[in-house]
Image (tube, rainbow, N blue to C red):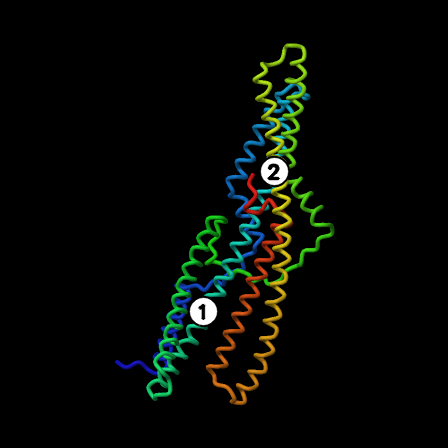
Amino acid sequence: MKLNKGIKKALLLLSVTSLITTSVLAAPVTEKKELDLDYAITMAISKDETLGEYARNTAVYTEQKKSIENIGSVEYSSKKIAIEELNQKKQFQKDRITKEVTEQYQNIVLLQRNIELLKKQINLNENQVKQVTIKKEKGFCDELTYEQAVQSLEESKVKKEQTEKNLGDAKKSFLNLTNINTDNYILKEENTYEPFVLDQSINSYATAMATKLLKYENEKVNLSEDDFKENIYKSGVGGTGPKYSDYLEQKINVENSKVKLQTSYDKYRLLIETQYTVLSAQLDSINTKANEYKNSVKEMKALEIKYKAGYISTLDYETQKVALDAKQVDYLNEVYKYNILKMQFEKPWTMSEYSF
C-alpha cells in the first residue's frame, strides 16, 4: 500500500522536527559569563583559613581581656595590643589575598593570550615549511634554511604544549584559592593602569609605611621596657627585686628587642624605597612597549596597502600580523606587572618579603 505525497511530506517534517528537538534537548548551549575579579577576591577571602584563625583568636583574647580586673596591668595592656594587632593582621591578610587573586587572574589571561598567539605562530611556521619545501625540491633553498624552518615549527609546538600545561596548573591554583573553575567563565582582559603619584618625598613615605608595619611590635617593645623599668629596676632598689643575674637577663632581652625592632624598621624602609625605584622603571617599560606597539600598528597599515597592491606575499604579511599580536601581548604583560608592583608599593605588607 502506497502513501500519498501529502502524508510522506508530513512524516518527513515530523521526523526532522523531532530530530532537531532531541538534539537541542540533549546538548543545551550555555553562554559563559565573565568572571568578575572582585567576586573571585570575595570567594578567596571567604575560604581563607588564616582569617578564620585570626577571628577565633580575637574572640578568645577579647574574653580574656574582659576577665582582667586591673586595666592598668601589663597583662591587660598585652591583651589589648594583641587584639588590635590581630585586627591589623586581618586587613593585611585580605590585602594579600586581593593581590594573589589578581595576580593569578592576570596570569591566566596572559597564558590564554600566549596560547592563541602560539597557535597563529604554528600555522605561520607550517606555511613557511611548506614554502621552503617547495623551494628545496626546485633547488632554490639550501638544506640549512629548510632545517631552520622545521626547527622553528617544532619549537613553537613544544612552547605551546608547555604553555598549555602552565595554564592547566594556573587554573588548578586559582580553583584552590577561590573555589572557582575558570573553565566555566570568560576572564576579562584589562589593559588599563593608573600611574602612581607620590605626593611626598620617598623618605617620608617609606618612614610612614615602615612605622605602620611595625606599629604593634613597637608597642610591645615599649610595654616590655616600661614593665622592666617599673617592676624590675625600681623594685631592685629596695632590695625586693630579682636576683642580679635575672635582672641582667631581662635587661638584655629588652635591649635585644629594641635592636631587632630598629633592624626591621630599617629593612622595611629600604625595601619600600627600592620598590619605588622598581615601580618607576616599570612605568618606563610600559611607555616603551606602548610606543613600540603604536609604531608597529602604523607599519602594519602601510604594509597592508602594499599587500593589497600585490607587492608583498601573503606569508610575509601574516608574519607581520603575528609579530604585531606579540607586541600587544608584551604590552599587556608590562601593564599587569606594573599594577601588581603598584599594589605592593601602596600596601607593602602584600610583598612576599614581609612576614607577619
Task: Please state which of residues 313 and 15 is positioned toward the viewer in this rendering.
Answer: 313
Element under disc 2? helix
Tell me the residue at 50%/65% (across/down): 113
Q: Amino acid at mark 2?
A: Thr
Q: Is residue 347 placed above or below 299 in the rendered structure?
A: above
In the picture, which quadrant includes the C terminus?
top right
Q: Amino acid at mark 1?
A: Leu
314 with respect to 59 (left or right): left
Residue 252 in percent (x, y) is at: 59, 25
Residue under pointer 2? 263
Residue under pointer 1? 118
Q: Quadrant of residue 161?
A: bottom left
Element under disc 1? helix
Tell me the residue at 55%/53% (across/down): 102
Tell me the residue at 62%/43% (across/down): 268
Task: Please state which of residues 22 and 292 is positioned toward the viewer in this rendering.
Answer: 292
Residue 332 in percent (x, y) is at: 56, 64
Q: Quadrant of residue 284?
A: bottom right
Name the residue furthest right: 199
Q: Is residue 322 placed above or below 260 in the rendered structure?
A: below
In the picture, which quadrant includes the N terminus?
bottom left
User: On residue 67, which mark appears?
Assistant: none
Tell me the residue at 59%/80% (across/down): 301
Q: Is residue 177 placed above or below 158 in the rendered structure?
A: above
